[in-house]
Amino acid sequence: MPEGLDGEELRTVQALQAFRWVCPDCDTENFDRASRVAFETPQDEEQVREALGARGDEEGFVVQAPDTVTCRNCLAMFGLE
Ligand SMILES: [Zn+2]
């Protein structure tokens, strides 16, 4: 367990995948959550994982970016390329 400056054990947080983008209007750096792709069947997910090059023993989820994002500073909305 990592320790803080005083030697006490640090609390932990879960790191989640996110998509980073910069607002073209106000130059603010934004982060939006990645969402887990919902597959009809486990076989569908396996096909996509194989197409992405994931090894069979690799853990993890297939994720996707949101369709639209909103700047946390100026509230401008954009589609993603
Ligand atoms: Zn902005």
Image: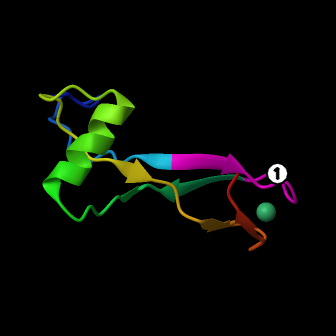
In this image, 76 relative to 70: left or right? right
Answer whether residue 20 is magenta in the image.
yes
Q: Position of residue 31 (x, y in %)?
A: 56, 53
Q: Residue at x 53, y 62 (%)?
A: 66
Mark 1, ligand 1, within 8 Å: the answer is: yes
Mark 1 residue type: Asp
Ligand 1 quadrant in view: bottom right
Depth check, front residue: 49 or 7: 49
Q: Residue at x 33, y 27 (%)?
A: 53
Residue most extreme to the right = 25
Residue segment shown in magenta: 19-28
Note whether 42 is above or below 76 in the view shown. Answer: above
Note whether 32 is above or below 10 in the view shown. Answer: below
Residue 59 found in image quarter:
top left
Depth check, front residue: 40 or 67: 40
Residue corresponding to mark 1: 27
Q: Residue at x 24, y 52 (%)?
A: 44
Q: Is residue 12 visible?
A: no
Q: Where is residue 48 in the image (x, y as percent from the top left)?
A: 32, 43
